[in-house]
Amino acid sequence: MTSHNSRIAVFCSGNGSNFKALFEVIRNKQLPAEIVLCISNRSQCGAMEFAQQNGITTLHITEKQFSSFDEFACAMVEGLKKHQIDIILLAGYMRKVPDAVVAAFPDRMLNIHPALLPKFGGEGMYGIHVHTAVLEAGETETGATVHFVNEEYDKGEILLQRTVPVLPDDTPETLAARVLECEHRLYPDALEKLLTLRRS
Ligand code: GAR
């Protein structure tokens, strides 16, 4: 049971269009949440720029900055604790989150995946690769999934899922754009669901 505004960290690696959609919905719908931290493995990307422009603290952190993976994982946990983070939202974060971070946020970390999990998930299945695989498999329907994060890639419990049609003349790029549009509505809805669960 939480009574204060949930403090959210988003993890991003690229454009951050899902991050931007979440930010807008939290503000417009006045959800009891606030994005207070943007973590990225890239010092410069659309997501980090957006965070800086909107007064959200940024943390650029990668394994390369540390002498061991454990140190990297500890520093990430420390950074999250320092900002009193309640919920982590992975939004186009193209790295595996260290197990120590997953363990520190049980049932409080979500990821968005651009397909209907459990199909088209797992290692190597990210971004455009997912849509290429969907087209190669001859699927007539795909979609987006928001799921809890556990130690295995794309295997955590599904929180919300929505379908998107595959059209006969789709390329990976046209399909990616249609799925992304769906993601921008799905992720805020999933966050709202998680907030409700945490308040009940
Ligand atoms: C989104 O389509 C997201 O689902 C995908 O990367 C894109 C990020 O776009 N994530 C994965 O493939 C993770 N396995 P964004 O940076 O514009 O939100």
Image: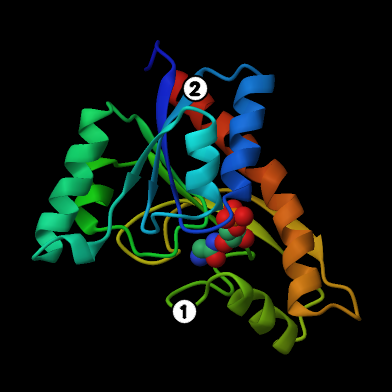
Q: Is residue 82 visible?
A: yes
Q: Nearer the viewer, residue 117 or 87?
A: 87
Look at the numbered disc 2 and give the secondary structure of its residue. strand
Mark 2 lies on residue? 33
Look at the numbered disc 1 and give the secondary structure of its residue. loop
The dot on residue 124 is 1
Which residue is painted at 20% across and 43% down in the image? 77
Which residue is painted at 45% across and 19% down in the image? 199
Left or right: 8 as drawn, with respect to 97: right
Q: Quadrant of residue 23?
A: top right
Vertical order, 149 against 49 (above or below): below
Classify mark 2: residues with Cα within 10 Å, few (<14), some (14-19) or many (20+): some
Residue at mark 2: C-beta within 8 A of ligand 1: no
Q: Nearer the viewer, residue 75 or 4?
A: 75
Q: Quadrant of residue 144?
A: bottom right
Residue at mark 1: C-beta within 8 A of ligand 1: no
Image coordinates of residue 120 in percent, x first then y, are 58, 75
Which residue is painted at 63% across and 49% down in the image? 17
Q: Amino acid at mark 1?
A: Gly
Q: Residue furthest bottom?
A: 136
The quarter of the image that holds ligand 1 is bottom right
**What colour scheme governs how the chains and residues are painted in the rendered image of this protein?**
rainbow
Which residue is painted at 43% across and 63% down in the image? 155
Vertical order, 64 against 75 (above or below): below
Q: Quadrant of residue 43?
A: bottom left
First reached walking from the N terminus: tag 2 or tag 1? 2
Image coordinates of residue 135 in percent, x first then y, are 74, 83
Q: Amino acid at mark 2?
A: Ala
